[in-house]
Image: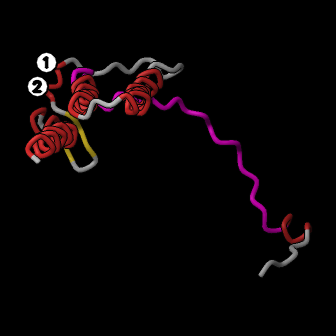
Amino acid sequence: MSKLISTELLDQKARIVDAPIKRKVEVDRTFELPRALYATTVGCYLGFLAITATAFGNPGLIIPMVIFAFFIVAGFAIPTIWTRLKPEHKSVAKSSSRFASEGVMTHTGRLTARDATIQMLILPVLIVLWGLAVVMIAATV
């Protein structure tokens, strides 16, 4: 239930404090991952589209495949632009050699480059393999 509180009561209980001090927060929008991992992910998704478009080539599928490809590219291009927005443009993606030596820090602790790469690429690779499996099943049936 709501209750009307008088201004006098608010003035008695209110505590006036100074405005909070604005502090510059350093934001790393690159997630400490090298660009090659993102490019590989995009390549796997576009590879899946290429495999299915080639196997099930149909003029009626041209427009949906172009739309899917557009969304895949946009899904990675927009965050890439986001990492370069000001004023936090100081963060830069790790190089592959630095990533290999340092790994990446996650919420649960530091991951080696190998483990982080496996976690990031497992789904895109499985999608490509799934596309190959579907094409092979369709070819044999």
Is 140 displayed left or right of 48 in the figure? left
Q: CB of mark 2 within 8 Å of CB of mark 1?
A: yes
Task: Report helix, strand or loop for mark 2.
Answer: helix
Q: Where's residue 30, x and y in %?
A: 35, 27
Q: Which residue is mark 2?
A: 101
Amino acid marked by disc 2:
Ser
| Magenta stretch contains residue 63 | no
Residue for point 11% across, 46% down: 137
Residue for point 70% across, 42% down: 19
Residue for point 55% across, 32% down: 23
Quadrant (top left, top right, bottom left, bottom right) of the N terminus:
bottom right
Q: Would residue 119 be seen by someone viewing this image from the given angle?
A: no
Q: What's the mark number on residue 132? A: none
The magenta span reads: 12-37
Q: Residue furthest bottom?
A: 1
Q: Residues within 10 Å of mark 2 (few under 14, many from 20)?
A: few
Front in this rendered view, residue 80 or 53: 53
Asked if 70 appears above or below 136 in the picture, the reply is: above
Asked if 69 appears above or below 18 in the picture, the reply is: above
Count the marks: how many? 2
Amino acid marked by disc 1:
Ser
| Magenta stretch contains residue 32 | yes
Q: Would residue 101 be seen by someone viewing this image from the given angle?
A: yes
Q: Where's residue 113, x and y in %?
A: 13, 32
Front in this rendered view, residue 4 or 122: 122
Q: What's the mark number on residue 97? A: 1
Residue for point 80% across, 78% down: 2
Is 65 displayed left or right of 10 in the figure? left
Is 36 displayed left or right of 73 in the figure? left
Q: Quadrant of residue 116?
A: top left
